[in-house]
Amino acid sequence: RNLPTVIVMAPPAEIELENTARLLDPERPHTIVVAGGGHAAHVLLGLLGANPLYTVKLWDARSHHLTTWRRQLDASGNLVSVTNEGAAMAGVSALVVQGTVAAVSDNPADVLPGADMLIIAAPAFAHDTYLKGCVPYVSDSTVIGTMVASGGFEWALRDAFGDRIDRMVTFGMDTLPWACRRTVMGRAATILGTKLLVHVAVTPPGSYDAVLCFLNAALSVGALPWFELAPGGYVATTLMNANAYYHTAIVHGEFAEWDGTPYAAPPAFYDGVAQELAGATIEQLSTEHLAIKEALIRAFPSLELGSVVSLPAFFYSLYGDQIGDWSSLARALQTNKPFKGLRHYMVPAPGDEDGYLPDVDARYFTEDVPFGLVPIKGIALCAGVPTPTIDRLITWCQGMMGKQYLVDGELRGRDVAETRCPQRYGFHTLDDLLTCDRSLAPSIEWDELPESDTGVENRSAVSTGANSIAGSAHDEMATLASRTADNRGDVPDGPPPLKVARHHAVSSPPLPSDMFAAG
């Protein structure tokens, strides 16, 4: 089957788990439960359900959606179809996959007992519903994963399962594998574009190879995306939560100076008039998030954070030659093919007014702030890193939402308990954060733990480090732009290479385009 060869550091003997071997068995039938019901859940159902070895079930906690699911599945013969508009990127001329859904329920007791794997494909604000709801019905051998870990997924897992989580395999991606949209609720979805690379946090370390091989075989469309280990584990996926940076910066760029007049139509999300402002804000955010990375490495020199890169570099690593113009970050956003046609989430103006108003209940607010920026700010506070741009975005967003997370630069607002910041779970130092994260086992030497109460011995050194990397995103943009011939939008050779952790190397030819079709 030409599966990738994965080389990992030998794990501690006490965490060898038999479910790792089961995942590696390509001939063993699996029962996989998809939790959610949105865009990504539809794609998962189609891709996984097309494999005859997989019995795929859906758990949608939103009871009011069940009637639609059952009606559509009855009409389609229990099939969910996935059309891949980005097939050319994967070297495939056209692709339509139909996957069988064996069962649908809003009750975990109906679908979870006996499941080999639970994959949560739902916004972060719904994670607790699924994590705490699944606890009585899954065994210690059930693999628990999420399509996007967002901020603090490891902490939420431990909050739901307690010490039991130490006996389980878990994984979380730093981004969705595809830009996708549900086209018919309960029946069809479209992949608008496939990302090049997805980093995955995995626990325990002994399960790296099994989880990554499974994901590359089961979810890659043709040869893409490539699922790679996230050096730095769940801390890295929290810091590299690109949606939290990009979405909030773009929403702020569009609406920060809005005077309250309804829009005649929902504005374009990525190619709107505010993108130059948003691009500048994203570069400022990039400097701050690299400063947090720098602080973590100062505190723990052996900590691998190779997947935490500048935000422009991360964007290019995802979309590569699907971007038409690399001359600036704003132009890259505007000319990325999978983003075409996407618009801001808006709601009709109330009363007799015509037009549309920003939807503050959309996931760009309800997910990307409390489960994105706020956890990142929490890590920054543990590390003693100033984050004025992050603070400004959180302050503006919480005002739009009617929430209070950040007060005078500290996470002590009345609504902090609704977030996944580390402070909610009682973590206030880097020691607290990193000693509880099982995904870091091979990359951090625990005798490095500093004695200071912040986990950083010298706060002024952190500020100096932040200043030393200021402008790195701008320099990176200039380098990339210089590779664009005459700024005509010609695509350069490819995105900048990403650093790979020293303890994890991959050696493999590209996955064949017919791998999924072959089962």
Image (cartoon, rainbow, N blue to C red):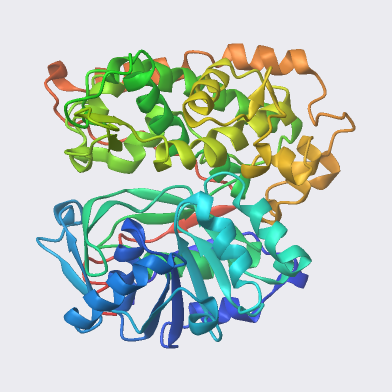
Q: Quadrant of residue 222?
A: bottom left
Residue 472 spot, x, y in % from top left: 47, 18
Residue 210 spot, x, y in % from top left: 52, 70
User: Which of the pair 87/50 is nearer the observer?
Assistant: 50
Q: Quadrant of residue 160?
A: bottom right
Q: Would residue 268 be seen by someone viewing this image from the given angle?
A: yes
Q: Residue at x 60, y 11 (%)?
A: 467
Q: Which quadrant is home to the N terminus? A: bottom left
Residue 354 spot, x, y in % from top left: 19, 29
Residue 154 spot, x, y in % from top left: 64, 53
Q: Is residue 460 left or right of residue 370?
A: right
User: Height in image: 260 above or below 243?
Assistant: above
Q: Would residue 79 be seen by someone viewing this image from the given angle?
A: no
Q: Residue at x 43, y 59 (%)?
A: 507
Looking at this rendering, what residue extends furthest in the right direction? Answer: 451
Q: Which quadrant is home to the C terminus? A: bottom left
User: Which of the pair 326/377 is nearer the observer?
Assistant: 377
Q: Is residue 299 left or right of residue 304?
A: right
